[in-house]
Amino acid sequence: MTALLEINGLTKKFGGLTAVGDASFKVNDKEILSVIGPNGAGKSTLFKLISSFLRPTHGEVRFNGERISGLAPHIVARKGVVRTFQETTIFKDMTARQNVVVAHHLQSKASLLGHYAGTLTARRDEIDFHESAAEILEYLGLGHVQNEVARNLPHGYLRALGIAIGLAAKPQVLLLDEPFAGMNHDETMKAVEMVRGVRDRGITILLVEHDMKAVMKISDRIVVLNFGQMIAEGTPAEIQSNERVIEAYLGREDQEIGI
Amino acid sequence: MAVGAFLLTVFAVVPWLIHVSGRWDFYYTLTSVALLSIASGGVWLTFYIGRINIGQGAFALAGGYVSAILVTKYGFSFWVTIPLSGLFCALLAVLIGLPILRLRGVYFAMITLVLTEVARLAALALPITNGARGISSIPLPGELSIFGLTIIPDFSTIGNVKLAFYYLATVLMVVSFAGLYRLVNSRVGHLCRSLQQNEELASSIGVNIAYLRVIAFAISSFLGGISGAIFVAISRSIYPASFPVKDSVDFMLNCFLGGLGYVFGPMLGTLMIYFGWDLLFTTGRFQLLIYSAILIMLIVTLPNGILSLPLFNKREADK
């Protein structure tokens, strides 16, 4: 398999604190890779480094062989690495559909001026975006709430809407920030199916997550962080039997894994 | 329908009413309202990308000076200076905006507030602006002709200059707001809204937020600049104190009062604030107290502006 995303010696220091220290791993094309670790392990920082919302102190992220760390987030998104956000970061005062339509920005063939003037290309763009948005919303089970203002939607829908926004950007790699946080068992299982579905559309997924059960179920491979250091990398089965992981993380919370 | 009625009112009914009643002073008042609402429309656009702009006075002043200097010192036609002063302000906004638009909320508001004062002090200090004496006895706008065809006659040959300025200001107001309306209802406007609601999310879907912010700020300042230029042509003079901080604050209040969610909010807000203040003139020394109390009440009870009243929204649905 080819490595789509390469993380080489990625390090981020905040003052004297090393949030992420020398992390190196690869994300293969069309796999689901999860990054796990106890609270404060540096998962979120790693996530921001990969999506270029933060600049690394050392090291780099390569996408398709090209260095993307240090670029502005919107450029990284344009290249095909798109992140979603923890919790409910959406455009609250727009309807679900408007959220997804506006997120098609990168597919726009017309320039901003063209959109202002309402050229033929711009109007065709708008039609395409609405069609594609309707399809994405339907796919993620949001079809029946597409005209609701986003701030009125229940929690579970918002999470799906966040993923819909990410999908609208037509990424090659979608970074999901704790997609299962705060969900009960049934909701999580539904969300797991949803994320699998996204991968089946040909999108590589890198997710950061707390929910061990979901992670074990969904991941092709897992990377474990502890205190900013990468302590293990492997398939779910390998991670479950890894001594260091059990010691650092799973040993304390083995009931939670439920295996 | 509503648009037609509005245009008819502005361009025909109002002049007719003034003609019948003989209240010629209303032309001056309404011209001011039109110009102030153009500048407020600009401020409204910065609100639309989620920034509180209390610096429009600076751009109105800059635009006024550009026009005054070009006309008096370099002999430019006034008509050419309108777009030039707007473009000058837009350029200025790009230069200032690039660093300061990274700030949000109250920090951006404070910097823009300072801008107005900086503009006043700069006008006092720079040699080209003639310091505190300002620039006065600016000639009336001359003739505008293209290929020998007269489009607008020389203002000094027009019997009724007030009416001429009224038409100039209202035509520009209609054009500006039509432009803003189009912007808000195009994809550009949707992107601006996405910026207002969440800049990080907007950049995660590939929106170049820095670029979009600067564009919006430049358009805003362009509108401030052209309104300043025309103000100067009307009063035929400009001083460093022509656009004080109070004006900057008023531009912002106009937007609040009309409604930040409605593109025509600043127009209505300007009209209400301007006339509201004048109507309260009879209350003498209580004028400011009553005026402020009403403003506070309106902002508390109608946080989304006057245009959020059901009365207006029903009309919008009819359109």
Image (cartoon, rainbow, N blue to C red):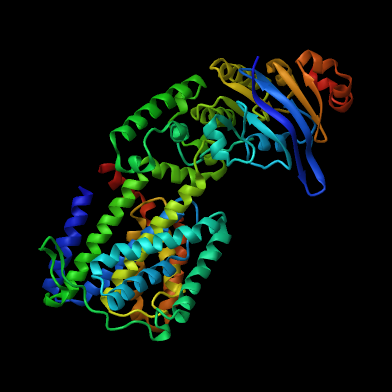
Answer left or right for B164 relative to B35. Answer: left
Q: Is residue B6 above or below residue A55?
A: below
- Most extreme residue toward the bottom, as rendered? B133
User: Can you give x and y, in whole percent of width and height, for residue B210 in the image?
Assistant: 51, 49
Q: Where is residue A254 in the image (x, y as percent from the top left)?
A: 85, 21
Using the image as rendered, state which of residue A65 and residue B201 is in the foreground: A65
Q: B319 left or right of A193?
A: left
The quarter of the rendered structure image containing the C terminus of chain B is: top left
Does the image show residue A96? no
Q: In which quarter of the image is residue A119?
A: top left
Q: Up-down: is B279 above or below B52?
A: below
Q: Residue at x 36, y 58 (%)?
A: B41
Q: Where is residue B126 in the image (x, y as percent from the top left)?
A: 45, 79
A207 versus B209 height, above or below: above
Q: In this view, does B275 lie to the left or right of B56?
A: left
Q: Which residue is drawn at 44% across and 75% down?
A: B244
Q: Which one is in front, B131 or B35? A: B131
Q: In this orientation, which residue lies closer to the viewer: A91 or B120?
A: B120
Asked which quadrant contains residue A235, the reply is top right
**Which residue is painted at 44% across and 66% down in the image?**
B295
